[in-house]
Image (spheres, helix red, strand yellow):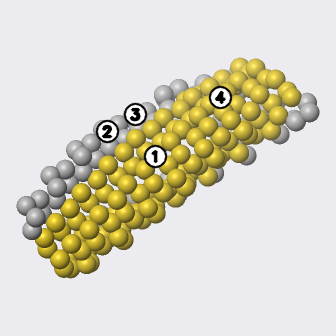
């Protein structure tokens, strides 16, 4: 019994075969990780928990040896991603809880914020709108904790194009931003 894709040499294993389904439930321990998972034809398949000796951990669905489906990844820096995976990449709807208290909930593609999402800062400020490759881009609104707000276009994390800036005192500016 051998696993591929960088799992290394297995030096301890406990395996239980379910003959009717060909699914194997196993515990594999190696120098860099501990894996409790289901296997099909020698590959991680179904639900499993991978704990790396570094402290990082993935708990969720696997398909063809890759994180695929719903899962939670615990990073060594205390970030945590809870959402959908596609072939080892964050993809689809998900929430990233950052170590500093910030939270992003929304769309992901290729491990990056892409599509619609809300980023809430620990300060109370928030951005709701479109993202491209981890950057605010397209239509979006940013609310500061003091009541100030910007609604409009963004490019490369900057206000850019037509938009409205609402000041906390009730004044506003409508126009183009560069």
Is residue 30 found left or right of 14 in the rendered image? left
Q: Nearer the observer, disc 4 or disc 3?
A: 3
For disc 3, the marked residue is 78
Sequence-first tag of 2 and 1: 1
Q: Kindly identify the residue that appears in the image at 26 percent across and 78 percent down.
A: 161
Mark 1: give few (<14), some (14-19) or many (20+) Cα within 10 Å: many
Mark 3: give few (<14), some (14-19) or many (20+) Cα within 10 Å: few
Sequence-first tag of 4 and 3: 4
Spatial CA distance of label 1 from label 4 is 24 Å
User: Residue 18: x, y in percent?
Assistant: 86, 28
Name the secondary structure under disc 1: strand
Spatial CA distance of label 2 from label 4 is 29 Å
Name the secondary structure under disc 4: strand
For disc 4, the marked residue is 35
Sequence-first tag of 1 and 3: 3
Depth order, front residue of 41/1: 41
Q: Nearer the observer, disc 1 or disc 4?
A: 1
Q: Nearer the observer, disc 2 or disc 3?
A: 2
Depth order, front residue of 136/169: 169
């Amino acid at each position: 019994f051998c696993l591929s894709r960088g799992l290394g040499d297995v030096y301890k294993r406990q395996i239980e075969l379910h003959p009717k389904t060909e699914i194997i439930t196993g515990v594999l321990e190696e120098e860099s990780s501990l894996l409790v998972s289901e296997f099909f034809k020698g590959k991680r398949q179904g639900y499993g928990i991978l704990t790396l000796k570094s402290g990082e951990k993935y708990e969720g669905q696997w398909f063809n040896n890759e994180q695929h489906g719903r899962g939670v990844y615990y990073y060594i820096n205390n970030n945590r991603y809870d959402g959908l995976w596609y072939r080892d990449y964050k993809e689809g709807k998900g929430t990233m809880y950052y170590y500093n208290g910030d939270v992003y909930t929304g769309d992901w593609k290729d491990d990056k914020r892409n599509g619609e999402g809300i980023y809430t800062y620990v300060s109370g400020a928030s951005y709701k709108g479109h993202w491209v490759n981890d950057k605010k881009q397209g239509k979006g609104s940013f609310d500061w904790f003091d009541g100030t707000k910007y609604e409009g276009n963004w490019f490369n994390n900057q206000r850019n194009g037509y938009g409205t800036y609402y000041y906390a005192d009730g004044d506003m500016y409508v126009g183009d931003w560069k």
